[in-house]
Image (tube, rainbow, N blue to C red):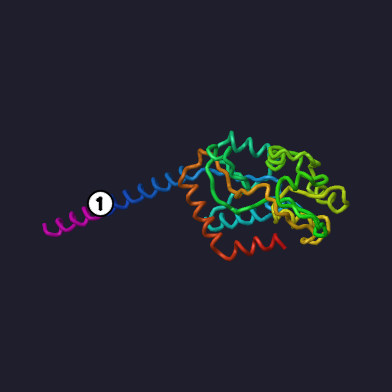
Amino acid sequence: MRNCNVFSVNMDLAQIKAAILSFLLIGIVSLYSYQVAAQPDLKVITEDWAPYNYEEKAELKGFSIEIVQAVMDELGEQYPISIYPGVRGDRMLETLPNVMYFSLFRTPEREDKFKWIGPISQEAIYFYKRKDNPQTYQTIDDIKQANNITVPYKGLIANKVDELGITNVMKLSSRDRQFSLLFSNRAELAVNTSPLGVAYYLKQIDKPVDSLVPTGVKLLEFPLYIACSKEIPDSVIQRWQAALDKVKASDKYEKIYSKYLM
């Protein structure tokens, strides 16, 4: 009789262990299912804006590309990065769920339309002149007295130039040409991109990176961010933000930035 009782107790313990194991497995599966549900299938996109995001010989390159890839490495997650024309990227961000779009200026007009991760970097856009140009420019009024300023054909920079009432401009779609006209004396100033961009385009036209210098007049100063669809959960935004902060605190960030500045 005693052996039967022991057998019964052992069976009870086995059943209890099985029940506990089953409960744990259900909990793990439920947690995993919740995490999967909370982790959307992100669509990470950018536009062709060298040297931040661009494609060269079928390879994605650029300062922001490398930073976003470093963030994904930090997270242990990988998403393909796709390049679209800027207008299409804007439309995708505004109409589709789970889109992350970089590198975007975080402007007051955009602030409440999206969620934000960043800044990837803090950028300023100045009016540039040739290194051998002795003229000094300290105010917008000085800029208005210049002979021809090359600016982008459209976009935030062109809009800001118009807003300031600067009319002595040549609007061009090619940034190479915007710079080239300075060296052929057909333009006196150029305003179209940040210091990283100036260095990149000067190299494209075989000019030393110091052959143009910034004037004392800043047109814009905006940090560059990853703009995100509002449907993306806050938990995902926070995880990406923490990973970006960690990358920026490492020496990897400065190495990537320096590579594109030289």
In the image, taking residue 32 as reference, residue 15 lies left or right, namely left
Q: Residue furthest top?
A: 95
* Front position in the image: 12 or 220: 220
How many discs mark residues in the rendered view?
A: 1
x and y, in percent, of residue 111 in the image: 55, 40
* Residue at image location 42% in from the left, 48% down from the top: 32
* Front position in the image: 48 or 175: 175
In the image, taking residue 22 as reference, residue 54 lies left or right, namely right
x and y, in percent, of residue 14 in the image: 25, 55
Badge 1 is on which residue? 15
Quadrant in which the N terminus appears: bottom left
* Residue at image location 52% in from the left, 59% down from the top: 246
* Residue at image location 82% in from the left, 57% down from the top: 133
Range of residues picked out in magenta: 1-15
x and y, in percent, of residue 243 in the image: 52, 56
Within 10 angstroms of label 1, few (less than 14), some, or many (20 or more) residues?
few
Task: Check the image and report above or below for 35 versus 248.
Answer: above
Helix, strand or loop for the magenta stretch, by majority: helix
Q: Is residue 9 magenta?
A: yes
In the image, taking residue 17 as reference, residue 42 lies left or right, namely right
At label 1, which amino acid type do we have? Gln
* Residue at image location 83% in from the left, 46% down from the top: 147
Q: Is residue 39 magenta?
A: no
User: Looking at the image, can residue 143 be seen?
Assistant: yes
Quadrant in which the C terminus appears: bottom right
Task: Check the image and report above or below for 109 versus 14.
Answer: above
x and y, in percent, of residue 230 in the image: 51, 38
Residue 2 picture quarter: bottom left
